[in-house]
Amino acid sequence: IHDAQDTGSGKGGRVSELFPTRWLALAASVVLALVTIYLLLNPKDNTADLFAEHMVAYTGPDRLRSDSVHVDDPWIRFTDRYNMGRYDEALRELDTPPISPVPEYLRAFYRGQCMLLRKSPDPQAAMIVFQQVLDEDNDLHAAAHWYIALAALRAEDAAVARIHLEELVEADSYKSDESRELLEALP
């Protein structure tokens, strides 16, 4: 594009840029700043994604009995529904006292599982029941720490998740490698 100072000789005149590069650099800086601010103000998307990426159902319990006489036992009905992935129904069965003796920590652990895996997860309630597992002496402590961390991620509470993941890494126990990976990915 020639400037209006053209003398008509075909020479002269000044060439100007249609879109100066300094404006392009400024626009790129503004876009980068806006994206950075958005990511800093919305870490919940990151924790929800981390939850979805790492949440896998804990192996279901075995049936305590295989005979059909005890089909009315809520624990057996729970076990069947849990192993079929019907977590809402399984959770209802856990609220009925079992005929066969089942330790309370085991019921609490699977109650927390169902709360996280159901169609409408309830991570706050899951953290509470997993804490009950930690309050008793049993062999599910490390797994309870893992699932509390995942529930905290679902609840967008990276600080609580960090505490439980660090516990697993320090003890070098259940899913410690995956815990290290999650710690690095936390916002």
Image (cartoon, rainbow, N blue to C red):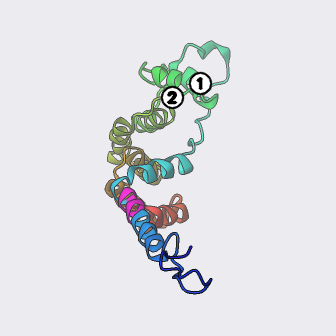
Q: Residue at x 62, y 83 (%)?
A: 10
Q: Find disc 2 in the rendering and name its residue.
A: 119
Residue 141 appears in view = no
Q: Residues within 10 Å of mark 2 (few under 14, many from 20)?
A: few
Q: Position of residue 29 (x, y in %)?
A: 42, 70
Q: Which mark is residue 81?
A: 1
Q: Position of residue 129 (x, y in %)?
A: 36, 38
Which-is-in-front pick, marks 2 and 1? 2
Up the image or down, 17 lies above or below 130; here it is below
Element type at mark 1: helix
Residue at x 63% of width, y 13% of height: 69
- Which residue is at 44% across, 49% downward? 45
Q: Main secondary structure of the magenta part?
A: helix
Res 82 quadrant in image: top right
Q: Which mark is residue 51?
A: none
Which structural element holds mark 2?
loop
Residue 126 is drawn in which quadrant? top left
Vertical placement of 51 versus 168: above or below?
A: above
Q: Amino acid at mark 2?
A: Lys
Q: Quadrant of the C terminus?
A: bottom left
The residues colored magenta run: 33-39
Figure check: 126 above or below 49: above
Whether residue 90 is visible, yes or no, is yes
Is 3 included in the stretch rendered in magenta? no
Tag count = 2
